[in-house]
Amino acid sequence: MNGPLVPFRQLVLKVHSRCDLACDHCYVYEHQDQSWRKRPMVMSQETVAWTATRLAEHAKTHGLDEVRVVLHGGEPLLVGPDRLRQVARALRDGLSGVCGLDLRIHTNGVLLDEAYCRVFCDEGVLVGVSVDGYAEAHDRHRRYANGRGSYQQVMRAVDLLRTAPYRHLYAGLLCTIDLANDPMAVYEALLALEPPRIDFLLPHATWDHPPARPPGGGTAYADWLLAIFGRWQAHGRPVPVRLFDSVISTTLGGPSLTEAAGLEPSDLVVVETDGTYEQADSLKTAFDGAPVTGFDVVHHDLDVVAAHPGIGARQQGLAGLCATCRTCPVATSCGGGLYAHRYRTGSGFANPSAYCADLMKLITGIRQAMRPATAVGRPGAVTVSTQPRHEIAGAELSELAAGFGGGDALGQLQRAQRSVQRVLVAAVHETAAGLARGTDTARVQEAWELVTRIDAVRPQAVEAVLAHPYVRVWAVRCLERLRGGRADNAPRDHSLASDLSHLSGIAMAAAIRGGHPARLSVPLRDGFVYLPSLGRFAVPGADAVMVESHQFCDGAFTIAAGHSTWAVTPAALPKDRTGRGEGVSRWQAVRQLSATGLSVALEDVDLFRDCYHRPAMPRLDEEMASRWERQFAMAWDLILRQYNAYAPGLAAGLSTVMPLTAGDPGRDVSATARHAFGAVAAAFPADHARLALLLIHEFQHVKLGAVMDMFDLFDQADTRRYKVAWREDLRPLEGVLQGTYAHLAVTDFWRVRRHTAEGPAADAAQAQFARWRAATADAIETLANCGSLTPLGHTFVEGMGNSIAPWLSESVPADVDRVP
Amino acid sequence: MDATEQKSAIVSDFADLDRVRLADLQVMSDEAVSGMLRRIVPATPGQGVAVAAFQSSV
């Protein structure tokens, strides 16, 4: 599939083309490309201005939130602090009001002093430094032209960055690997410089000019890196190491964090001192002229460059790899390695990396280290890749695409969700046990063993708890935090260890549901012990309680903390065995909303329910809960009577309603979360008709999210933003798809309502119908023409289009636009 | 979708683990799991994540 144009988010600005060092491993001067000889030494201010203009127009066109610019060279400090200030200001001024700017500089450090640091402070420029380890290691290559080493000067620079006024500028250290250097000593030397992050770079090499290796040293680079990895992991990962974090991230399904590994599309362009655009400059190691595009900042905008085949070649993901790499078991983490390292005269870049064996060994080694010891060599272990695949009948997908979906269709989606839930929980356990810093691994392991024991004898009990919408939210949050890097968007009010310990509550909730005798210490959060899908119990002042479930006791359990013990029967109020009579107020069960043939949870206590754009309501009092039940029952009756086509899907799939805090008066508030399958969140609506609409609307998101869990409907590389009628901001493609699917049902709601309501309400319904059918039809056309849908995505959008087509010819009053 | 497509099943690349006991499930080191997780928990550009970062800068 030819993907859409991938906008550039990273621009390398070569402000100076010469260097004050003569490192013999430098790809700019010592490798195949020699274009530096013909380039101006310093980038003119006019070229900087043009670059800023081109970047701003590109960011505006593609709705980019932020771009990164790296000042580079040669050696960028050679332009002097005043000139660097001018460059920084030109970039910030050019992008002001358009998007954010992450501005960095990478330097050999030898010139860095207070004058430069003051400029970087003023202009917000982060500073990365190249350091190859201890003195002998660093000076092996990083020398002046006269042969003198640069270590002392670089250490002065790093020491300056470590001082209080400039510490916030210190971005990290890059270390180029040399097998002659002791890896442990290199690692400890870098660690001693207290960098916020480190990366290790494989020296540039191709199949034409392979990397230096000792005799018989087939994977010497992997061995070198794995030695460091082992120490890094054993010491609790004291500093982010980008290459290691990238392998961990991709193993957990996350993005790669470096162009040197992984399948993420390259979104990088270089501007040389003469204003010419180039592809990633590591290509200089391949052949003379390898990075050339033929375009420049004066005559060409960045969209022209983005369409260059050389740029596109590094954006094809798995499809862009050679046959060997496509079928490799570490492809998602390796991605064929750095593009330049694949080069061989005759076959171009259609090869594995010249470091293939090293990358295989490194990634395999890291992944093996991520598995807990208990999982290694376990008999009966099942590998996911050997299991049959989920499928959905064409007819059921058609139903869903048309905006509906009955019991069978939802059943298929729910079955797939069960697989999602199992994978996520297992991934959290394995990763937490293997890698997480500061984790109480014994507690996680104990909880996991209990869950697996119950799963063997009472699988429905485990299934019921894992199916709780906010268990998946919990698991995803843990995985995102375990991935590391800046992908961790979780709130920092609780530690990762605290989040992981929620597995104890999950295990005991399953034990209680299954009537399986068990006893487990469960940590408290904010004074409560949480039992997902059941409720929470208050024990203020305690860190953990002992929860005990009993055999055949119909959901009864006991909680003990200190000298106090409470017996809880979910159907009754808890009895306080100490006789103090406090039990009544401590247990907060998850209540049920009952309607004709349907019962869903009213979830106002779960620890991870606060995952929407509005805050969750605190625990509802009994009166409010009763109002919800009445409103829900009436809304469901309305759906059964007038919107029956949506009822089977809702009956099969809606499991939870989560109350949100109210919005502005007169405005309905509702939401779904991609990871909370089965849940709809809403502020208490004005009437039952509004609730019916909210349920129908939001459940569309639930269904489509589950479909997108199973199938790719669009190319994730399309990061463009699109205009839709229901939002002021531009939306990503997934948002357009979700919004269109939801508004298909909203349109249908008003299409019916205009005939069932009377008087002004009917007029208002006519206006809503006219408004939303036009908006939805426009959005369907946008989707159909975006060029990024997969074949299945096209089928799905066609299904939506087939539903709305007959509605477009239904008549509405001529003056419908005048109805407020 | 035509009549033929309606009758056929559309197969996901998502493994069916519904009948696999949790104790037997081994997810790490499995390329298929990485693929599943990429779809379930995709990274979203523009959320402050520098994906595929230029390697000659840190």
Image: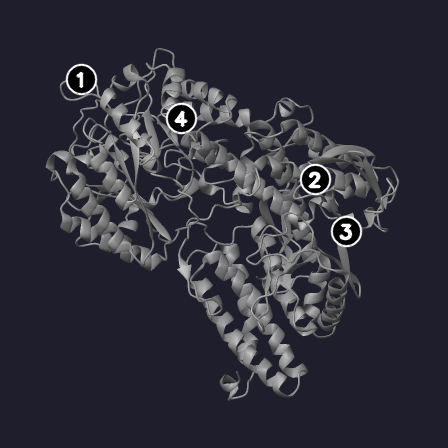
Q: Residue at x 76, y 56 (%)?
A: A591
Q: Residue at x 49, y 72 (%)?
A: A775
Q: Residue at x 88, y 40 (%)?
A: A552
Mark 4 or mark 1, earlier in chain? 1
Q: Secondary structure at mark 3?
A: strand
Q: Are marks 3 and 1 on the same chain?
A: yes
Task: Name the chain letter of the residue that bears numbered label 3.
Answer: A
Q: Secondary structure at mark 2?
A: loop
Residue underneath mark 2: A541
Q: Are marks 2 and 4 in contact (CB under 8 Å)?
A: no
Q: Are marks 3 and 4 in contact (CB under 8 Å)?
A: no
Residue underneath mark 4: A356
Coordinates of residue A718 in the picture (x, y in percent):
41, 53
Q: Are marks 4 and 1 on the same chain?
A: yes
Mark 3 or mark 1, earlier in chain? 1
Q: Nearer the viewer, residue A417 or A374?
A: A374
Q: Are marks 3 and 1 in contact (CB under 8 Å)?
A: no
- Label 2 amino acid? Gly
Q: Nearer the viewer, mark 3 or mark 1?
A: 3
